Each structure stands twice: as C-alpha cells, then as structure tokens.
C-alpha cells in the first residue's frame, strides 16, 4: 500500500525532534519526520546536533567511545523499517479480510444457487 508522503513544515519538525530522541513520537508523526528529514538538510542538521548533545553527554559521563552520527543514521533507518513493517501488516490484514469476505460470498452464492 503506497502512502502519500505527508508534508510537514520545519516548524512542525522542531516539535517532533525531542519526542523522537526520547522514543515518545508516535508512528504517524515519526513517518512524517523521517520523510521531511530526507529532503531537508537544515532539519537533519538540527536533529544531528540534538542527538549529539542528548547521547553524547550521557556517554561522556560513562567514558564510552562512540560514533553518534552513524548511530543516528541507524536509528532513523530502524524507525523507518518499523513503520514500513506496520504498513505491511495492515495491508496483509486488509487483504486477508477481503479474501474472507469473498470466500463467504462465494459460499452464500453456492447455497442460494442450489448447492
């Protein structure tokens, strides 16, 4: 099921960044955010800065080595894959329900016609 990419403004993205970093962004808004970040370098730069601050400060306190840019890219990829998986499951359920309805109609016609 191809979804139209919902457009959001850079101002809307500002409201999504912190919830995304804290894993509090719902799937619909996460989908909008990821699609916006694919075409807006300024918002992607802002997310990178916030991610570096958010994760970097925690890790510096622990003394760990890290590549935050690669981790952010991986996190965005996994978020997108999660959303695509949910869409595939929804599509499969719709197709399964349609098949059950068709099967029920075929059986009903068979009974009515004289089966």
Image: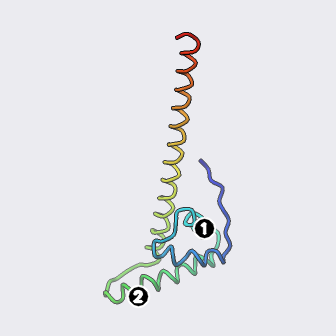
Q: Residue furthest front?
A: 112
Please state the horizontal and vertical placement of residue 36, each as a whole percent of the image: 62, 68
Location of residue 88 with respect to 39 vertically, above or below: above
73 displayed left or right of 112? left
Q: Residues within 10 Å of mark 1 (few under 14, many from 20)?
A: few
Using the image, tell me which numbered label, if any, was put on residue 38.
1
33 vs 60, nearest the viewer? 33
65 displayed left or right of 111? left
Q: What scheme was used to colour the molecule?
A: rainbow
Q: Quadrant of residue 67?
A: bottom left
Q: Quadrant of residue 57?
A: bottom left
- Kindly report which numbered mark, 2 or 1, lies closer to the viewer in this rendering: 2
- Residue displayed at 54% across by 38% down: 95
Q: Residue furthest top?
A: 114
- Residue assigned mark 2: 57
Label 2 element class: helix
Please state the horizontal and vertical placement of residue 37, each as a whole percent of the image: 60, 70
- Residue displayed at 52% across by 48% down: 90
């Amino acid at each position: 099921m191809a979804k139209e990419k919902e457009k959001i403004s850079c101002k809307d993205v500002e409201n999504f960044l912190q919830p995304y970093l804290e894993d509090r962004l719902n799937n619909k808004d996460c989908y909008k955010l990821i699609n916006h970040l694919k075409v807006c370098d300024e918002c992607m730069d802002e997310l990178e800065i916030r991610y570096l601050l958010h994760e970097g400060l925690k890790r510096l306190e622990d003394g760990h080595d890290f590549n935050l840019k690669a981790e952010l890219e991986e996190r965005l990829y996994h978020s997108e894959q999660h959303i695509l998986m949910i869409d595939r499951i929804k599509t499969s359920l719709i197709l399964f329900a349609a098949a059950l309805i068709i099967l029920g109609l075929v059986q009903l016609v068979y009974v009515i016609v004289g089966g």
